[in-house]
Each structure stands twice: as C-alpha cells, then as structure tokens.
Amino acid sequence: MRRFHSLVSLAAAIGIVLTLPLQAHAETLRIAIAGPMSGALAQYGDMVKAGVHTAAERINANGGAGGRPLEIVEMDDACEPKQAVAVANRIVSQGIRYVIGHVCSGAALSAVDIYENEGVIMVTPAATAPQITRAKPRKMIFRTIGRDDQQGPAAAKYIVERVKAKRVAVLHDKQSYGQGIATSVKRALDAAKVPVAMFEGVHAGDTDYSAVITKLKARGIDFVYFGGYHPEMGLLLKQAREQGFSAKFMGPEGVGNKDLTAIAGASSEGMLLTLPADFAADPANADVVQAFRAKGRDLNGPFQMPAFAAVQVIAEAVAASKSTDTAMVAKTLRARAFDTPIGKLEYDARGDLKAFEFVVFEWHKDASKTIAG
C-alpha cells in the first residue's frame, strides 16, 4: 500500500514507545511498528497496531519470545516514502532490530534497503507491491500477506468467470500500489482476451472525477476496476452514481475500509474487492478473536490478523534460534513452518509466503462485507 500525505504530528513523527509488562531481569526484544499513525490512511495503521499489540500481549503472557519480553515501539510514516526513510533511520539509530511494517507499498519500498543493509528484519502485513521482495534478492524482508501479482489475477479471474463484462475500464491512482495492482489486473485480463477499453490514471487527492466518469460513460464501459485507496474509490463511486453511471466497480484491499462508506454512502453498495480471507470468522481462531475483543480492538479489516501473525513468526523464530541475531532469525524464518491464525506459513527464498489466497468480497452500504457469489 502507498500514499502521500503531508501533515504528521511531531509526537508521532518522533515515535511513541509503548512498553508492555516485562518480566524481571529478562532481555527485552524491541519491535517497531512502522506505518500510518496519522493522515487519511491512519485507519490501516490502527489495524496493524491492533494485531501487533494483541499478539505481543499474548506472547508476553506466555513467557515472551524464548524468555524475552516484547516491547512495541510505534513509528509514524504517514504512508509517505520520505517519512518512511526517516522512520527507518530512526529505527536503526535506536538499535531496534525488528519491524512490523511498513504498511503502504511506497513507504515500504523506500525503507527496505535501509533495513537490508543494516541487518534489520522487516515483516510487512500489508504492503503488496512485488518489488518489495522481488526487485532484487534480500535476506531481511518478509511478508504475512500476498503480492499484487497474486491479487491481480484473483480479481481478473472473477471478472472473467463471474462478471462477464463486455467493456472493462482499469483505472489507477498513478502511485506504486495502485498502478501496480491495476497493471497486474490488466495483464491478466489481456491474457484472458477480455477487452480493456480504457486504462487510465487519475490524480490521488483530487475531489472531482467527473471528467473521467464522463469518459467512462462515453466509451460504454460496463465494469470498472480501480487500483488505489478508499478516498478516491469513495469519490468515484459517489460521483458515478450522481452522474447516472451504474457500472460495477471493483478494487483491491486498499479500498476495504469503513471510511469508504462514509464517503460514498449508499453508492458503495455492491462494490467488489479482493481481500485476505476473513480469518476472524474461522472457529479455530476463537481464542484470538476473544483476545482482540477483550481489549476493545476492532477486527473489521484486512490487516489485523496478518499483523498478529507477523509478531508471532518473529517471536517463534527468535525462540527457535535461541538468539536475537537477525541473520540467524532470518534463516530460521525460511527454514520453518509456522501455525498462525492466518494459516500455516512457509517462506520462499525471497521472503514471500509460499501460498496466500485472496478472496473476492462484496461491500455493503453499512460497511459490512460478504463473500461474493
């Protein structure tokens, strides 16, 4: 995920340290959360924080990571690449060797080489751009979510097999995440010989998309895929319906946010989107779900459980390695399988999960979602 925003509070930029109850005389394992604590995408940061803190509390209650209590440090990158660089350097300077994040792809792409060069392990539960792990070999970078080149084909498969659209438009926000996932969808549609009548970018942050909606209507588009985030998708949906354009819209996990409905209202009804599975609905995760609810933490989002799993795999790899040396822990991450609330996780040589499934959901105007038929 990726997005540019300008205003970051001084306190958040410096970093908020939250120390969980520690065991006496035990070495603390410090883990940073790097993500949007402020700005229009802060809700995604909230999702990750909920997962990280819930996991850390449970791990500490059970003796920590190989006897080491976890200490969580929050760092605000506002999903801005420049701020992400500052956050990454701050993490390194503070001697923190483990990071959950970054949340947005553009921010993650700006930070990964710093972590790689400094021997800091980063596990992102949300950033889906393939380049994060696949642009070049990296030993310290991992995910607990799939990539856009997995998510895009899942969306395209649904469009081909279920929607059967005649004239498809693929829009994006001209940014790393949005353009990347849109390109992946277009590539898969092209391979399936589904006509993409329009492939075009819009400006993130604009408030008037009437010109592009007029163009969609003029070209007889009956289905729109948008690669980007909920603020732009919400406005596209709202303004499309106001202009009498009734084509179905679809987007990636970046649009799966209750604030979408706050923007689009009833116009959000029926939007399609790809998301990780609803892990909170799995009966096997009942105790984890209860741990979230006991702290009043919202589970209605795609990143809480992947964030929980990110902390878990770090803690288990540290315990198995009997060391906090990140080179040894990284090798352990690749060598072992981890049973987590998002399933059995195994890593390939690039730090990607060997398997991850994206599911197509239908969004409703009350900000709920159901699996699409």
Image (spheres, grey):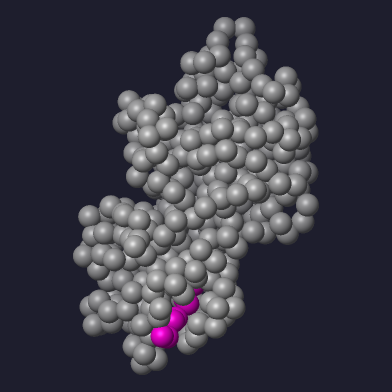
Q: Residue at x 42, y 42 (%)?
A: 279
Determine whether 148 is above or below 238 in the image. Answer: above
Q: Residue at x 29, y 66 (%)?
A: 270
Determine whether 136 is above or below 282 in the image. Answer: below
Determine whether 255 is above or below 108 in the image. Answer: below
Q: Residue at x 49, y 28 (%)?
A: 55
Viewport quadrant of the C terminus: bottom left
Residue 46, x across and y down, in percent: 41, 42
Q: Residue at x 33, y 66 (%)?
A: 271
Q: Is residue 320 left or right of residue 13?
A: right
Number of marks: 0
Residue 222 showing in the rendered view: yes
Q: Camera-side residue: 251 or 76?
A: 251
Determine whether 197 is above or below 180 in the image. Answer: below
Question: Of helix, strand and loop, which mostly describes the magenta segment?
Answer: strand
Q: Residue furthest bottom?
A: 218
Q: Which residues are magenta?
A: 166-173
